[in-house]
Amino acid sequence: MTRSRILIIAAAAASVVLGVACVDLFHSTEFDTLCTRSPEDPQCRDGGATNVDSSTLPDADGADAHPDFCSWTSTQARERALRACAWLGACEGPLGESAFGPCVVHAQLAFDCTANPDMRPAHEADAFWSCLATVSSCTDVDRCVFPGGVPPCAPLATGSFTSCSSAKGVAPRVKCVSPGGGRFEGVEPCIMLGQSCVREDDSVAHCGGSLGTVQCTQSGCSGSFAVGCDDPASPLNDVGVDCSASGAGRCEPSDAGPVCAPRNPAKSCVTEKVAGCEGSVVSACLSGREIRVDCGLLGLPCNDAAAPTPFDIARACGNEPDAGACVGSDRCAGTRLEACGRGATYAVDCASVGLGSCAIGPSGRAACARP
């Protein structure tokens, strides 16, 4: 499938729906992968082979096949995540979860079938990540983030604001600062979080759940959306996700709250269990299905105190502030970029992925320069 075909599918679906870490990379896991459970899955076309060949790299004409994520080892998935997030920050500007460190965590969850076998990206999210995994120019990145074309910022007299892009397709959150309009300073593709862009007012927007600015009072399923009203850090805001972006693509109720159903190969289970840690693995038994994520393969510990939700158990992957988490701002050393993602340090040499030197931007976040 060509990239243009992928983006057409993403834009059509969006018309209906809004929307190197300093740890061991070779942590073992005892649970099955997506491809051992379901080798016929589209992401397992080669039966879970472990070698990456030239078919996963950008074609010369810029029309790329969908990468076979499940053919990548965890180390290869990490390398692809570092590259993809370096390009995203360089071409669009870091904002929120698109900053290099947080982005690498999300990209690994998308690219690593061994670490995250049950909640594979789907529909618009799959189109976004498969596109970003194969970019070789900022024009390519623009097509991944803005399938309908890059709209300019509205003209400003003074100051800055965040808003939802008016581009067709899944609207990213954008930051505008140029007095005369022009290009965005930073972009956060909400689809990478499985969320929609929500405008709070004329100057503030965030990536959030389906309720938008409506007060969130009760968690539950609303169509494919998992509505989340129980986040103590964001009271009365819906912090839920669109379950169509991952797993089986639907929201299901459970005793613990709304859950995004895993793909069919997920193991069945009997005793309902909210997300908890077993070593470096976070697991849950929700709505009769077991969901597991190996945080260790992402370069992160499993942290019960991180308050994972039924619809996003991967939130348990991360360091506690007083338990070895990296501290301080992003750092640059020539072409080397270092940044924190959930308390772990992720690093990339910008030149090694075809980008310019690292620099700290006005937001205080580091990014490689455009090629």
Image (cartoon, rainbow, N blue to C red):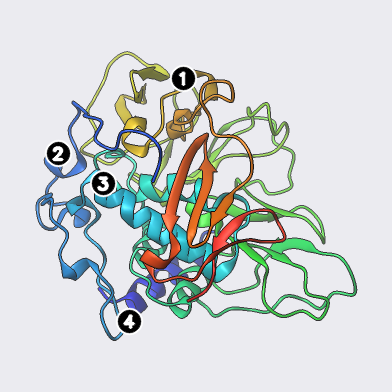
Viewer-nearest of discs 1 and 4: 4
CA separation in Å, label 3 and label 2: 21 Å
Q: Amino acid at mark 4?
A: Gly
Look at the numbered disc 1 and give the secondary structure of its residue. Answer: loop
Mark 3 neighbour class, 10 Å CA radius: few under 14, some 14 to 19, many 20 or more: some
Look at the numbered disc 4 and give the secondary structure of its residue. Answer: loop
Which residue: 30% across, 80% down? Answer: 63
Badge 4 or badge 2: first in the primary sequence: 2
Compared with 273, 172 (above or below) is below
CA separation in Å, label 1 and label 4: 47 Å
Residue 26 placed where, x, y %? Answer: 24, 35
Which residue: 63% across, 27% down? Answer: 230
Query: Can you identify the residue that label 1 sits on?
Result: 255
Badge 1 or badge 4: first in the primary sequence: 4
CA separation in Å, label 4 and label 3: 25 Å
Viewer-nearest of discs 4 and 3: 3
Query: Can you identify the residue that label 2 sits on?
Result: 37
Residue 132 placed where, x, y %? Answer: 40, 65
State the residue lying farthest toward the top: 271
Residue 103 placed where, x, y %? Answer: 49, 51
State the residue lying farthest toward the bottom: 61
Query: Can you identify the residue that label 3 sits on?
Result: 75
Res. 222 visible in picture? no
Badge 2 or badge 1: first in the primary sequence: 2
